[in-house]
Amino acid sequence: QVQLVASGGGLVQPGGSLRLSCVASGFTLDNYAIGWFRQAPGKGREGVACIRSTDNSTGYSVFVKGRFTISRDNAKNTLYLQMNSLRPEDTDNYYCAAGTDCAHGVTTVMTVRYWGQGTQVTVSS
């Protein structure tokens, strides 16, 4: 059974850090582009960061570049999102994904094949 299980969300003060994890099962992550998206209630899902499967190069949205770092551990079949200098506007439900392509402009864009469930990140004092 194919699954992506995300964890690591929570409540953090502005300026704080969180690390999100996403464990894949039923398929091998290193064969795919991987990424993180976020979505607020009533809004569309927005690409935050992604890693290409071809050369492991990364892309970030302009809203998080320099603060967030995406990475993968193929041995653990896991992807991560290290989030530093968090701001209240980063408050969203965060989703991991695996698929093809990884492009970035204002936000990142992927063709998603598998979605994980969301993990809530709340940045508030």
Image: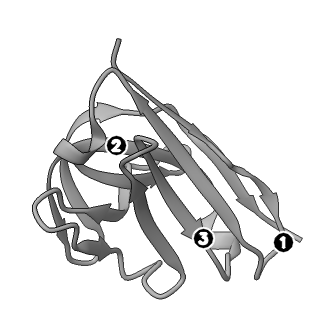
**Residue situated in front as seen by the camera: 87 or 22:** 22
Q: Residue at x 27, y 66 (%)?
A: 108
Q: As shown in the figure, which amino acid type bears the numbered disc 1?
A: Gln
Q: Quick one: SS at disc 3? A: strand
| Cβ atoms at labels 2 and 3 below 8 Å apart | no
Residue wearing tag 2: 97
Left or right: 64, with 113 as reference point: right
Rendered location of residue 40, percent (x, y): 54, 50
Q: Quick one: SS at disc 2? A: strand
Outermost residue on the bottom side: it is: 66
Q: Residues within 10 Å of mark 1 (few under 14, many from 20)?
A: some
Q: Quick one: SS at disc 1? A: loop
| Display colour scheme | one colour
N-term mark: 1 or 2: 1
Residue wearing tag 1: 13
Q: Residues within 10 Å of mark 3 (few under 14, many from 20)?
A: many
Q: Residue at x 34, y 54 (%)?
A: 35
Residue 57 lies, with reference to residue 122, above or below; the image says below
Q: Quadrant of residue 86?
A: bottom right
Q: Is residue 90 visible?
A: yes
> Looking at the rendering, in which quadrant would you find the C terminus?
bottom right
Outermost residue on the top side: it is: 1
Given this view, does label 1 or label 2 mark the residue nearer the observer?
2
Left or right: 48, with 31 as reference point: right
Separation of marks 1 and 3 at Cα, in angstroms:
12 Å
| Cβ atoms at labels 1 and 2 below 8 Å apart | no
**Residue situated in front as seen by the camera: 91 or 116:** 116
Residue wearing tag 3: 83
Residue 18 lies, with reference to residue 120, above or below; the image says below
